Structures are given as structure tokens and as C-alpha cells.
Amino acid sequence: MSDGWVEHPLPTRMLHWLDADGCRWRRIGHGELSWKIVRRMIFDDSVEVVLFYGPEPKRVIGQQARRELWSRVEPVLRGRGEVPHQDFAAVPFQDAQERLMLAIEEHC
């Protein structure tokens, strides 16, 4: 019998992640990224951006979607969030071809 608990992937606690396309990503660096680095990475088209919220991570594709995500993330990362208990964390990953991925973890 299930207790209703569904485990969600949390990039801040993972060393590796296998995406839906079968690409294996490994976490690089230590700790969370500063808001300045997140801003730079989120608008860099060569960086894959994935939002981890709920059971299925979602790719953020296109500059408009990245701007919308940044408008939600930036105030919280700078300590000016308006939604109680909303939090974001961002960590970098890299694949075997050395492509970068920005993993953004959202909590409410």
C-alpha cells in the first residue's frame, strides 16, 4: 500500500542525473551557484536549462521561457521573493561531451 509519497529528483542532492533522452549528466562544482552566475547561464543558449519541480523535470526552451523563469527566480535568489516559502537552488551539471546544464530546483 502506498502512503502517497512520490520522490522527486533533487539536483542539489544528486551527483548524476539521467535525462529522458538517456543523456547522463554529472554534477560539477560544490554548492549552489550565485544569482549572478545563474543569470549568465540561464541566458546562454549553449547551456541546457532544466527546472526541477515535481516528479518530472522540464526543459526550459527558448529565450522567452528563460526570461519568464528568470523573472521568478531572480527576486528569490536575491532575497526579495514575494511568495512565502518559495525557494530556488541552482547547480551545474556537465555531460560526456562537456555540454553544460543549469539545474534549477524549485521548492514551495
Image (cartoon, grey):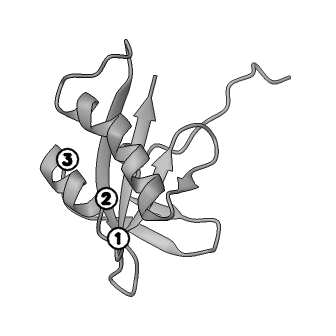
Q: Which mark is residue 47?
A: 1
Q: Earlier in the sequence, mark 3 or mark 1?
A: 3
Callout 3 amino acid = Gly
Q: Quadrant of the N terminus?
A: top right
| Residue 43 versus residue 10 in the image, above or below | below
User: Is residue 60 among the parts visible in the rendering?
Assistant: yes
Callout 1 amino acid = Val
Comparing 59 with 16, the one in front is: 59
Mark 3 surroundings within 10 Å by alpha-carbon count, few (fewer than 14), some (14 through 19), many (20 or more): few
Q: Secondary structure at mark 1?
A: loop
Q: Earlier in the sequence, mark 3 or mark 2?
A: 3
Q: Which mark is residue 91?
A: none
Estimate the x, y position of residue 68 in percent, counting from the top left: 42, 45
Q: Which mark is residue 42?
A: 2
Q: Are marks 2 and 1 in contact (CB under 8 Å)?
A: yes
Estimate the x, y position of residue 94 in percent, counting from the top left: 34, 72
Mark 2 surroundings within 10 Å by alpha-carbon count, few (fewer than 14), some (14 through 19), many (20 or more): many
Q: Residue furthest front?
A: 64
Callout 2 amino acid = Ile
Report the residue marked by disc 3. 31
Q: Are marks 3 and 2 in contact (CB under 8 Å)?
A: no
Residue for point 37% across, 51% down:
67
